[in-house]
Image (cartoon, rainbow, N blue to C red):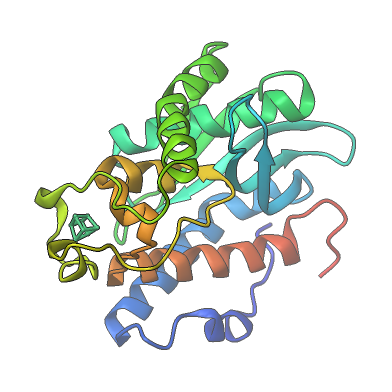
Amino acid sequence: MTPEIDWAKYLPLIGDDLPDFDQEDVMTRCALAVHTFLEKDVGFVRGVERRVEVDLGQTLPIQAVWDIEMGDAETARGIVDWKSSFESIVEEWQWRTSSAQYEVLYGRLPEFFEYRVLPPKGKARVIRVDPVPARARRETYDFFQPIDAYISAAASGSAGGFWSRNFRACKGCPGYIACRGEKPPETKFHGDHLSKSSAEQFLFCPESLRAGHKQQNRYMVRGLSMHRILAEIWRDHALVGATK
Ligand code: SF4
C-alpha cells in the first residue's frame, strides 16, 4: 500500500517566489510520483539526493547529484533521476556521468539508470538505460576532457582575461554590459569541480562560467521545488530503515 503522505508537512518546501499556478503544478507532479512509484520503492532506497564527486583522472573532479540511489543496506543497484520534462540530447550526459561515477565508487557499473518523467497531466513515463553500456566511463572522460583542459590552461594563464565569449548566447545574461567593455568583471573562476550543468554552461559560453553568471527562470525554480519535496518524501518513507 502507498504510504499515507502528510502533504501539509511538505508544502513549505515550495519556493515562495513561485506563482500559485506553478505551486499547483509542482504538487500535481509530486502527487503523481507518490502515486506511481513510492510503494514499490519503500525499503529499496539506500540514498536520496546524494552529492557524488569523483576523480576521473582530469584536473577537476566530476560532481553530480543522484536523486535516488536504489539498493538495500548492503548492495547498491542503480540510480533514479526525477525529470519534469525529458530533453533526450541533454539527458544523455546524465546517465553517462552518473554511471561513470558509480563505476569509480563501486568498481562496477550500475545495473540500470532510470529517468522518471513527471508530466503535469497524464501518466508518468519511465526511460531506463538497462543495461548500462561499458562505454559510459570513457565517453564521460572524453566529454569533460577538452573542457577541463581549457579551464586549467585559462585558470593558470594570464589571470583576469575574458574567457571565450559567445555573443550569440547573451540574451538574458547578467554579463551583457561587462562583456561589451574592455575588462572582464573582477570575478575569478572559483570552480573546484565540473558537472553536467557547468559543462553545459561552458559549452554555451565559456565566459559565463568563468564569471559565474547564473540564469534562472521559473521552470528551473519549479524543478528545484519538485526535487526538494520528492527528496523529503522519499527520505521519510522509502529509505532503507525509514520508520516514519
Ligand atoms: S558571459 Fe557570454 S553570454 Fe554572457 S554576456 Fe558575456 S558573452 Fe554573452
- Relative depth, front residue between 59 and 243: 59
Image spot of residue 64 (x, y percent): 57, 45
Residue 147 lies left or right of residue 173; in this view the side is: right
Q: Is residue 222 visible?
A: yes
Residue 238 lies left or right of residue 120; in this view the side is: right
Image-quadrant location for residue 92: top left
Q: Report the quarter where the N terminus lies.
A: bottom right
- Is 3 located above or below residue 79 in the figure? below
Image spot of residue 232 (x, y percent): 65, 68
- Is 159 located above or below residue 140 in the figure? below
| Residue that sits furthest to the top in the current view | 134
- Is 143 located above or below residue 236 in the figure? above
Residue 164 lies left or right of residue 44; in this view the side is: left
| Residue that sits furthest to the front in the current view | 158
Image-quadrant location for residue 61: top right
Q: Report the quarter where the C terminus lies.
A: bottom right
Image spot of residue 59 (x, y percent): 59, 33
Give the residue drawn at x 25%, y 47%. Answer: 205
Give the residue drawn at x 37%, y 53%. Answer: 209
Image-quadrant location for residue 16: bottom left
Quarter of the rendered structure image containing ligand 1:
bottom left
Q: Is residue 131 visible?
A: no
- Relative depth, front residue between 58 and 11: 58
Image spot of residue 125 (x, y percent): 39, 42
Give the residue drawn at x 66%, y 25%. Answer: 110
- Is 99 located above or below residue 6 in the figure? above
The number of numbered discs placed on residues in the rendered structure image is 0
Give the residue drawn at x 20%, y 48%. Answer: 165
- Relative depth, front residue between 168 and 228: 168
